[in-house]
Image (cartoon, rainbow, N blue to C red):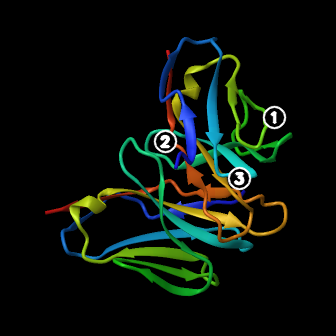
Amino acid sequence: QKEVEQNSGPLSVPEGAIASLNCTYSDRGSQSFFWYRQYSGKSPELIMSIYSNGDKEDGRFTAQLNKASQYVSLLIRDSQPSDSATYLCAVRHGGGTSYGKLTFGQGTILTVHP
Amino acid sequence: NAGVTQTPKFRILKIGQSMTLQCAQDMNHNYMYWYRQDPGMGLKLIYYSVGAGITDKGEVPNGYNVSRSTTEDFPLRLELAAPSQTSVYFCASTGTADSNQPQHFGDGTRLSIL
């Protein structure tokens, strides 16, 4: 059973602070990792993807991957109220029979308060 | 750019009724997926397809059927609706199973079984 676990929420941070979202996965063959943002009543929206160990930065977002520890995280700097949403961690498994399938974590609700 | 289009957006069914959730994409993607998302949870894979005529079960296929007669369309069929199938259903697609290709999501169908 391939599992993806996210840190339990909800997470509440003040405006301007750094929000840290964490995700662990069980399948060591996993190759690609995605963070989706989902506003209430909307569909998931891709915000970050990462494939190699280390950090990847895009604007206020930084994804961190540590395959040895089977851990991926998302940091949001200078958090804004508009960042308030559910963040979903998704893992794509490697191998020819994965067919691009994703396994999602349960999501972490982030609230940024003014 | 239409992307992934799902219809209907909302539907209420009575127990035992049947219906088809429609999904169409205009990106010539081979890989398509159906997910369900229960309140406060992540997405769970119901069925997926790797091309016209080829489908396979995901994590939670019971009570559902799919077909893929064309590259563009991937309908999901509920034969005997049950209250446990009350959920939000998302269709997604991707062009290849390569690790760095994200999935693109439709806007979802909110289904209530009463």
Q: Position of residue B82 (x, y in %)?
A: 60, 20
Marker disc for residue B107:
2
Q: Where is residue B78 in the image (x, y as percent from the top left)?
A: 67, 23
* N-terminal-most mark, 1 or 2: 1
Q: Nearer the viewer, residue B25 or B32?
A: B25
* N-terminal-most mark, 1 or 3: 3
Q: Name the residue under label 1.
A: B69
Q: Mark 3 points at which residue?
A: B29
Query: Residues at marks 1 and 3, common chain?
Result: yes
* N-terminal-most mark, 2 or 3: 3
Would you say the residues marked 2 and 3 are in contact, meaning their CB atoms lie under 8 Å apart? no
Disc 2 to disc 3, C-alpha distance = 17 Å
Residue type at mark 2 is Asp
Looking at this view, name the residue that lies furthest to the front.
Answer: B1
How many numbered marks appear? 3
Q: Which of B2 and A5 is in front in this view?
A: B2
